Image: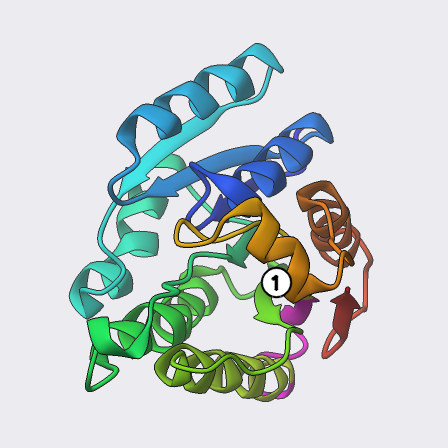
Amino acid sequence: MAKGWALVTGSARRIGRAIALDLATHGWDIIVHYHRSADEAQKLAQEIDALGRSVCLAEINLADPQAAANLIPSLAEEIGMIDALINNAALFEPDNTDPDGTRHWAVNADAPRLLSKAFRDHLPPTEKAAIVNLLDATPPVNNFTAYEKAKIFRADLTANMAKSFAPQVRVNGVACGYVLPSPRQSEEDFRKISGGKIVTPQQIATAVRQLLETPGLTGQMTTIA
């Protein structure tokens, strides 16, 4: 029996992919959100389908606030109620690529806020659901101020929503340590920065699933580092 639909943002690649596959393996139907990774999203959808779970593809740019606000209402018209939202997608680029920080704020801070509000608002009054936000447990990095500010906001948002959305929607966070090198890093540089203490995507996926499937648990920040 299906546990319901879970929307995983940024799920075509990397950590989001691991979360989506883990949830599908454990009985969830999955909405695969992506922006530019169409080929990877299609491949993931095929793998989820092979697991016997339903899958839906959702391609939008989370930097567009109107698209972010409209995503869940449009999905609900197509597939019905969505039972879980995992705000995983994030932009991680140096400050010189985003001098005023607007792109990082749009994707890492504003999109989770808009998606979470739409998620709560689409629920029937008697239904309960859950949100898990992916946070950051790594030390500050030089030249990534815009990223860090937006991720700090996401952590504060998690705590605030846990209070304001209760009791209908449980809201928790998973703060991740060093997991995967960025496209700008070599494996050697990544291991040097992380001190060799690296978290696997599967460890994060397991933590997300446990938070989703533990009734009554809200306002928790689980650190995997």
Q: Quadrant of the C terminus?
A: bottom right
Regarding residue 124, the answer to whether it shows in the image is yes
| Amino acid identity at mark 1 | Val
Splitting the image into 4 quarters, where does residue 162 fall?
A: bottom right
Q: Answer few, some or many: residues within 10 Å of disc 1's Cα (few below 14, many 20 plus, some between 14 and 19).
A: many
Splitting the image into 4 quarters, where does residue 41 fall?
A: top left
> Judging from the image, what secondary structure is the residue with disc 1 in?
strand
Q: Quadrant of the N terminus?
A: top right
How many marks can you see? 1
Q: Which residues are magenta?
A: 163-175
Q: In the image, 68: left or right of 220?
A: left
Q: In the image, 165: left or right of 216?
A: left
Is 43 located above or below residue 8 in the figure? above
Residue at which label 1 appears? 132
Q: Nearer the viewer, residue 165 or 155?
A: 155
Q: Nearer the viewer, residue 73 or 161?
A: 161
- Residue visible at 58% across and 79% down? 158
Q: Nearer the viewer, residue 154 or 128?
A: 154
Residue 12: % across, % down: 42, 36
Residue 15: % across, % down: 56, 46
Is 206 located above or below residue 17 in the figure? below
Q: In the image, 62: left or right of 13?
A: left
Q: Is residue 171 magenta?
A: yes
Q: Nearer the viewer, residue 156 or 27?
A: 156
- Residue visible at 39% across and 54% down? 184
Residue 130: % across, % down: 63, 61
Splitting the image into 4 quarters, where does residue 71 fall?
A: bottom left
